[in-house]
Image (tube, coloured by chain):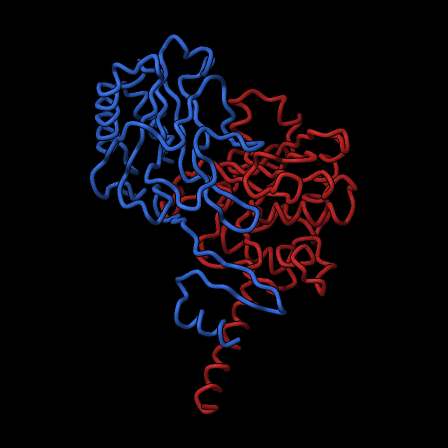
Chain colours: A blue, B red
Amino acid sequence: MIRLAACVLVASQLSCTFSVDGHTHDEPETVLDMSTALLVKSRDRLAVCLQIDPLLAEHTQVVAARLHADLVALADAHPDWQASGLDHGEISVEVGCPGGAIVDGPISAKGAGGVVLGPGLLEEPSPFRTHVHVIADSRATAVLGDEPYARALAELAQVDEHRVAEVSTALVVPASALGSEAFRMQALADSLGLQPR
Amino acid sequence: MTRFMLPALALLLLIVAVAGASHSHNGSVQLHISTIHDNNGTSTAPGSLDEEYCIQSHTSEVSTTALGDYIETMLTKRPGKHWDGAASWRVDLWRTAKPCNQYTSAERAAIEVEYHVATAWPSVPLCGNTTYSCTVLSKPTLDPLKKHQHYDWAVIHFQSRHVRGLDERARNFINHETGHVLGLADPRWAGDCSESVMHNALYGCNQFAYVTYPTASDLASVARIAARQN
């Protein structure tokens, strides 16, 4: 009991181990922060990673620059950018996503059966709120069908014992979509939890 | 020494009592389905702010139809002991006409909750392959009142052995996992027991083994989440 009291009184924001009736159970401090679209406490600005189709490897820097420009334009244009808490710090785009997943076919958007496009469940999610997978236009039909883009779960965090929640979103788009308003205001917005416009 | 310990113990008892009263209502991180805050359906058809759910069996141990019928009965046809109508009908549950896999991707995107059952879930985090039933929340979005983030989709993965009997045990799992979809949490430590479908015999709270349905306390917690009062 004393240990529980000390835990509650002194370290209510820290991970605590409780002992009741001879059983112990860890109550981990959550990494989640539902007050912002960044979703994770350790994220203090919008960071996006770019996973590029090997067919486009020689254009990586150009694609990364375009993606960055699209994010900056979205920040200027979307009315909920600030309300979502995305207006802190500088937007960054980094080449290469955690796990290095390559999309090679249609993917489930909801994660049923554990389908993810990324590292999945992590104790410490990455800094990247969105994993953007840019595929060659020649593969778009095979991966996306008739849809302009696809989304999937990239990273998950534990909520409680047997419940997890998406904290990073995978967005799959053809290269030719970048730079368009439809990409910015629909696909990119959607991947950040903003209402598509 | 005693002089200092007594106030500390009294404070501890107060904290424990308060924690017990609030059971499944533990502050700001009560992740929930995004449609819980409103309702725009009619008496005969769901609206975009209602909760549609589909069912899919991946095992011959229980059919999609049988499980679907049972889930629908547990969620909507046990007045006083079901989730439907909670929070002044902000929780308004509607079963889809077809199994989950018979919808296109676009149609399926409009279904908020999916119930799946299989004999194992080797790839679903925290299901422990054949051990636990578990829930995945996905598609985080901004609350229309811009107060928080919540989730557009929830996928429940049942272990077949938990629900195939279509019995009291199945009801317990169905209502417990649905409680997660609506924002309620598991017990925070062993012995965190109360008259709640989230804190019952599934977690060793044998004194509450009779609770296999949402209690008044559970429904009150969901009402607070729906009203953004958590």
Within the image, what quadrant is residue B127 found in?
top right
In this rendering, is residue A101 above or below A24? Answer: above
- Measured as percent of width and height from the top left, residue A105 is found at 48, 17
- Measured as percent of width and height from the top left, residue A59 is found at 25, 15
Quarter of the image containing the C terminus of chain A? top left
Which residue is rendered at x = 40% and y = 50% of the image? A31
Q: Which residue lies most toward the top here?
A: A138
Looking at the image, which is closer to me, A144 or B181?
Answer: A144
Looking at the image, which is closer to me, B152 or A1?
Answer: A1
In this rendering, is residue B2 above or below A105? Answer: below
Q: Is residue B208 left or right of residue A85?
A: right
Which residue is rendered at x = 52% and y = 51% of the image? A160
- Measured as percent of width and height from the top left, residue A29 is found at 43, 56
Looking at the image, which is closer to me, B220 or A20?
Answer: A20
Looking at the image, which is closer to me, A126 or A137?
Answer: A126
- Measured as percent of width and height from the top left, residue B36 is found at 51, 45
- How many numbered dots are placed on residues in this image? 0
Q: Is residue A79 left or right of residue A119?
A: left
Which residue is rendered at x = 71% and y = 53% of the image? B212
Which residue is rendered at x = 56% and y = 43% of the image? B126
In this rendering, is residue B98 above or below B35? Answer: above
In this rendering, is residue B16 above or below B179? Answer: below
